[in-house]
């Protein structure tokens, strides 16, 4: 994977099956968005056309949430309000813009709950 545009200090890729496809090896860091299972279930089942069977089939194809959290460099807790989630995202963007280069150079990404 190569970014060809110049002048970008940060590039974000939204890859739903990142770990399942092995693409995590092609990125510098991974942020996972996560909510407790019941909240995730409620949100997904509220989507038009979604059924319990479809939801369970989706889960069967995915790495379990706990494993994603363990493998991630950064975790964004989406069990909160949209405003609180946005604040976490903005905090992570600021951190990566300010210290991302030195963190990457030193390979010092730690598990970071945003």
Image: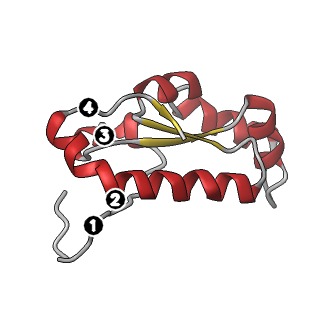
Q: Residue under circle 3?
A: 24
Q: Which residue is mark 2?
A: 97
Where residue 54 sits, quadrant-wise, is: top right
User: Which mark is first along the chain, 4 or 2?
Assistant: 2
Mark toward the viewer: 3 or 4: 4
Which residue in the protein does label 1 denote?
Answer: 9
Q: How far is the residue under mark 1 from the one under mark 3?
A: 19 Å
Query: Which residue is situated farthest in the front direction here?
Result: 98
Protein image colouring = secondary structure
Residue at left offset 47%, top offset 51%: 92
Residue 39 in the figure: left or right of residue 100:
right
- Asked if labels 4 and 2 touch by Cβ distance under 8 angstroms, the answer is no
Q: Residues within 10 Å of mark 2 (few under 14, many from 20)?
A: few
Q: Give percent across and percent down for residue 41.
A: 78, 38
Mark 4 or mark 1, which is nearer the start of the sequence? 1
Q: Nearer the viewer, residue 66 or 9?
A: 9
């Amino acid at each position: 994977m190569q970014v060809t545009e110049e002048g970008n200090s940060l590039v974000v890729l939204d890859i739903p099956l990142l770990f399942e496809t092995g693409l995590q090896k092609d990125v510098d860091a991974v942020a996972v968005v996560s909510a407790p299972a019941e909240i995730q279930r409620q949100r997904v089942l509220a989507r038009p056309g979604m059924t319990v069977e479809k939801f369970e089939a989706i889960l069967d194809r995915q790495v379990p949430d706990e494993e994603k959290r363990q493998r991630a460099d950064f975790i964004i807790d989406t069990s909160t309000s949209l405003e609180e989630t946005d604040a976490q995202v903005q905090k992570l963007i600021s951190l990566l813009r300010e210290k991302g280069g030195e963190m990457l150079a030193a390979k010092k990404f730690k598990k970071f709950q945003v």
